[in-house]
Image (tube, rainbow, N blue to C red):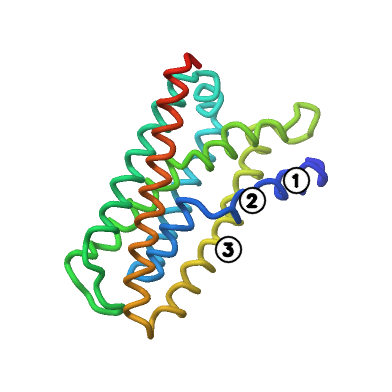
Amino acid sequence: MATTAILGFWGVAALLVLTPGADWAYAIAAGAGRRAVSSVAGILSGYALVVIAVAVGVGALVAASPALLSVLTVGGALYLVWIGLNGLLRRPAPLGEATERDGSRWSSFLRGAGVSGFNPKGLLVLVALVPQFTTRESAWPPAAQMLLLGGLFVVTCAVVYSGVALLSRFVLVSRPRSAAVVARISGAAMTAIGLALLIERALEALSGR
C-alpha cells in the first residue's frame, strides 16, 4: 500500500480526532472520575468494531443506505443525550472515592464503546473516508488496506484520548470542585452535541433530504 495514501489518510483522520467532540467530552469526564482506563478502552473498542465492520463490507452497506445511516445517527445522538444528562444531573463523587454510582469498570467500558460506536465523526472517518484511500491496484486486498487505515485511526485515538483523560485527571485530582465543574461541563457538551445532531436530522427530514 502506498505510503502517500497512508500519510494522507492519517493527516485527515488526525485532524478529526484532535477536533473536540463527544469522545473528548467523555474522555475528560472519565479523567475527572475513577474509570479513565476502562472508559478510554471502551472508546477504542467501539472504533475497532466499526473498523472490522467496514473491512468485512458492512460499512459499504451502511454508506449506501441513507435511511440506515440516519437511524444510526439518531440512535447515537439519543445515546449521547442520555450519557450527557446522566453526567450533568448526578452529583460527582470525589476523585479516588469508590461509590456504587460510578458503576463497574465494565459499565464504563460499555458506555465508552457506545459513545464511539455511534459517534458520527467515527462513522464519517471509517465508513466514508477509509474506502477513498484504498485501491484495487495495490498488492494488498481492500479489506487489509481498510484494516490498516482503520487501525491507524484507532491508534491515533488511543494516543489523543488517553492523553486527554490523563491530563484531566492529573490537573483535577487536587481540585475536587473544579473536577465537579468539568464533569458537568462535559455532560452538558455531550448533551448539546446529541441535541444538535437530532436537530440537524430533523431539519434534513423537513427539507426532504
In the image, residue 2 lies at what x, y percent? 82, 42
> What amino acid type is highlighted by mark number 2?
Leu
Three-letter code for the amino acid on which mark 3 is drawn: Val
Q: Residue at x 36, y 55 (%)?
A: 188
Q: Which residue is mark 3?
A: 159
From this viewpoint, which residue is outermost toward the left? Answer: 100
Label 3: state its secondary structure: helix
Q: Secondary structure at mark 1?
A: helix
Quadrant where the image shows the N terminus? top right
Name the residue at 75% across, 26% down.
Answer: 136
User: Residue shown at 17%/67% (left/top)?
Assistant: 100
Task: Please report contact status of discs 3 and 1: CB closer than 8 Å, yes or no.
Answer: no
Q: Which residue is mark 1?
A: 6
| Residue 152: image tag | 2
The image quarter containing residue 157 is: bottom right
Q: Residue at x 29, y 79 (%)?
A: 96
